[in-house]
């Protein structure tokens, strides 16, 4: 290596928001959602290989900052993610994120990437992958309640993965619905903006709820949920934040990602700690039943789990072999002699003439 | 903001290794060590304001990857750090690190920085700051056992903060000692390379141990430690890794950063869980005695704690107002309408003509 130039081990590829947009558009939004669903499902299939840790959360009055680490013994990944419901008032995102993938053998990061957009994609891909296992046969219409940043990705993932053709949208803010209708019509979906949750769920075989308030809220009541429906509940994802009336939960067969986390963060925080739930990886690997009748209400109580980010990180890392959407960051010190970190500094001084 | 350009909230300043070297050289290595010691001490003074969490570690056969989060309620910081003793065989660093500082109010990162070099600096600054409170009066000579990447920073910090004039170096690898002698002589220190630990500790009022093997090792035995000495033990910093003979520990007054972490990772993992130790923040704030006699052996059982990284992150962040050593990273998605993440993607498509 050249003196003063970053060495081969010092460089970590970085995928910026701009690069992630280019990557997503080049692959195609729905193709990427489809691919991510495949990668996420593959990691659910080898669930027991993962060293799983509940996320490490720093709570404040305004929100939460979380670190979500996970490893399969070969790769290690973590995501930094915040959740600040009041952020939209200052023009910021409620949720932003970035992530890192590393090589367990030497501990060196191999990827740093934005994950705000990637989390939106992996969340939607996870919902659709799970729904493909649980939704009633012939489902073609989805109600989408909550029309914020996640809603379009949900709708497109359900088209790409589950074959949904029609979405019925509702948000307490009509401007949010108008925005989502506009965005999704441009994608060729059959889209209806609705004036109420009741209207949105009519005739839908799948109901997705994705609202952002950090409080117990009742987006859906029991009378709105018909037999045979699959509910995809995304919004309840931290302590004190739920979306569904308790009666819906007791009537549904509940499926979760990782029970220790969902008990604290999901809709089921409303239920007893021993209320039966089924882990999705068991359904996917055939070790537990999924939907068992056409009249059953299935509920995916989704809070987002680190394996999904891990799958997304590995997917993006793999794409960088094909797509040039990254820049090289000089993130790691790489002296000629690993024990001579100080010497690296002194050579820099000599080279630059700094005193 | 201009369509397709990163918006004001999307940008996070990034300090690369190259930038950190420039910053360190521009400020001056010893000045920066001195400044960091001040900032670290200030945060020790307000110890009780911090939300402290033990680090989150992912262990493997080859090493460990850790996340060290901490918050004072206004700022939040975390460090990613690996420890892989065999890495030097492949030309990599045993320890590399990077870190992030964020605003608790909105959860947005305000700094991403390399921390391999910064950790070397903060570790040395912490050692010297602690020694300033504990070393015997008139100390002027330090033994430095273990002459790896951390050793020169330790020696210079002890000169800058404690007024040490002479250092006596020993490493089981003579090439490491030769490297450190060369580097430190160029800095104008009185440096002696020694053929044994015994030789290195002769006449030294301070003994610093900093070796890297991930195993129980005995770098110092009891007969080598004279009365009145201050021992600064850096190398024992993970389960199963210690440097000092147990007899030294039972004879010393032991000072630590954060007992729950040091009991697991420090030299005191060799002792009973209730062996008395003194928290350094209590010494610094006058709530506990430090050194009480000139014959006492004081031991700082240092494992590195998240407040020290937090101080270093805040220090670097503050310097960026004065020094231009950073680049702007497009790390966070910043759509015009925070709820319209998908629309941001579509506008990117329209702008770039991608299909």
Image: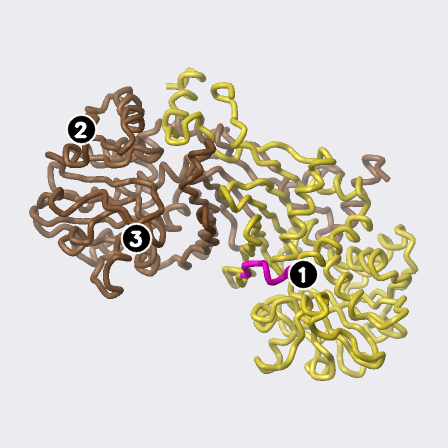
Chain colours: A brown, B yellow
Residue on which the image places disc 2 = A166
Residue range highlighted in magenta: B45-52
Front in this rendered view, residue A50 or A79: A79
Quadrant of the rendered image containing residue A239: bottom left
Q: Is residue B190 above or below residue A140?
A: below
Q: Are marks 1 and 2 in contact (CB under 8 Å)?
A: no
Does the magenta-highlighted stretch encompass residue B323?
Answer: no
Chain at numbered mark 2: A
Query: Gap in Å between the C-alphas at discs 2 and 3?
Result: 27 Å
Identify the mark at residue A266; answer none if there is no mark.
3
Query: Gap in Å between the C-alphas at discs 1 and 3?
Result: 38 Å
Q: Residue at x 71, y 53 (%)?
A: B39
Crowd around label 1: few <14 · some 14–19 · many ≥20 (10 Å): many
Q: Nearer the viewer, mark 2 or mark 3?
A: 3
Quadrant of the rendered image containing residue A232: top left
Q: Residue at x 90, y 57 (%)?
A: B189
Name the side, left or right, on which B198 lies relative to B270: right
- Where does the C terminus of chain B fall, quadrant-wise? top left
Residue on which the image places disc 1 = B44
Front in this rendered view, residue B68 or B48: B48
């Amino acid at each position: 290596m050249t003196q003063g130039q970053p060495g081969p081990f010092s460089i970590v590829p970085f995928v910026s928001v701009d690069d992630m947009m280019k990557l997503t558009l080049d692959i195609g939004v729905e193709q990427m959602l489809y691919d991510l669903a495949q990668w996420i499902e593959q990691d659910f299939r080898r669930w027991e290989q993962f060293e799983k840790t509940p996320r490490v959360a720093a709570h404040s009055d305004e929100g939460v900052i979380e670190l979500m680490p996970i490893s399969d013994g070969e790769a290690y990944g973590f995501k930094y993610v915040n959740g600040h419901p009041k952020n939209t008032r200052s023009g910021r995102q409620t949720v932003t994120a970035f992530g890192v993938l590393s090589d367990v053998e030497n501990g060196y990061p191999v990827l740093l990437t934005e994950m705000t957009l990637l989390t939106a994609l992996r969340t939607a891909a996870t919902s659709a992958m799970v729904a493909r296992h649980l939704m009633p046969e012939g489902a073609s219409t989805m109600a989408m309640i909550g029309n914020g940043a996640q809603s379009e990705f949900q709708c497109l993932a359900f088209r790409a993965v589950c074959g949904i053709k029609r979405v019925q949208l509702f948000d307490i803010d009509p401007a949010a619905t108008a925005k989502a209708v506009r965005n999704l019509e441009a994608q060729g979906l059959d889209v209806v903006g609705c004036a109420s949750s009741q209207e949105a769920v009519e005739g839908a075989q799948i109901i997705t709820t994705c609202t952002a308030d950090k409080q117990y809220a009742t987006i859906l009541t029991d009378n709105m949920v018909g037999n045979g429906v699959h509910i995809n509940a995304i919004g309840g994802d931290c302590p004190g934040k739920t979306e569904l009336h308790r009666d819906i939960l007791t009537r549904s067969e509940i499926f979760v990602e990782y029970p220790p986390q969902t008990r604290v963060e999901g809709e089921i925080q409303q239920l007893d700690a021993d209320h039966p739930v089924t882990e999705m990886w068991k359904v996917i690997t055939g070790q537990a039943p999924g939907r068992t009748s056409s009249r059953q209400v299935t509920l995916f109580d989704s809070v987002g789990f680190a394996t999904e980010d891990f799958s997304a990180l590995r997917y993006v890392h793999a794409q960088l072999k094909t797509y040039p959407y990254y820049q090289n960051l000089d993130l790691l010190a790489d002296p000629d002699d690993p024990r001579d970190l100080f010497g690296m500094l002194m050579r820099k001084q000599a080279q630059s003439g700094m005193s």
